Image (spheres, rainbow, N blue to C red):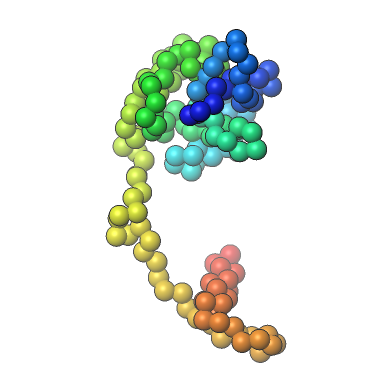
Amino acid sequence: MKGYNLTIDSDGRWCLAAEHEPLYRLTVEYSKSGRARCRKCSELIPSKTVRIGKPIKWSGFISSWTHISCFWQDDKGPAYKKEDIHGIEKLKQNEQKEVLQQVAKTKPPSSLKMITPDDPGFLKREPLKRVKQPENVQLQLLPFQEEGYGWMLSQEKND
């Protein structure tokens, strides 16, 4: 992470590195529970599969997890090396090779659909239906509140 020298402590958490501690830019491990979501495709990362974590600042530092297949070097930093990756030695040989091949990629995988704000369909949405307020509401709702009320009612119908 830019501007920070990070390492992984004995509990597997990102922390600021002391002077002679190894520096890491990524961490890899087998997914523990299957509850984490990939930050690139938003799908769950199945339990016991290899995942790649990149540090992000959040009340300290946490790992932003991705599937191996969804990872690419999207920053402008130097290429990742094996010594930049915490936990890689705990993986099977073929998984280590796969991780190293994937972290060398600088373009997103073709399986991911990139979203761009310039795309005309990016913010395409249907107009919200305004719904009159219930009789027991004393104050007059503003137009955006009527739209919000209509949206909430439609969400209840969809459940």
Q: Residue, x 56% and y 86% (percent of image)?
A: 132
Which quadrant would residue 153 be assigned to in this image? bottom right
Which quadrant would residue 149 be assigned to in this image? bottom right
Q: Is residue 91 visible?
A: no
**Above or below — where is 64 with respect to 90?**
below
Q: Residue, x 42% and y 15% (percent of image)?
A: 81
Q: Is residue 140 visible?
A: yes
Which quadrant would residue 117 be assigned to in this image? bottom left
In which quadrant of the rendered image does the C terminus lie?
bottom right
**Camera-side residue: 143 or 131?**
143
**Image-based side of 3 in relation to 11, left or right:** left
Q: What x and y, as percent, mark residue 59?
A: 65, 38
**Image-based side of 135 in relation to 128, left or right:** right
Q: What x and y, as percent, mark residue 65?
A: 52, 33
**Camera-side residue: 82 or 154?**
82
Q: Residue, x 48% and y 43% (percent of image)?
A: 42
**Above or below — where is 132 with respect to 77?**
below
Number of numbered discs: 0
Q: What x and y, as percent, mark residue 114?
A: 34, 45
Q: Residue, x 54% and y 30% (percent of image)?
A: 55
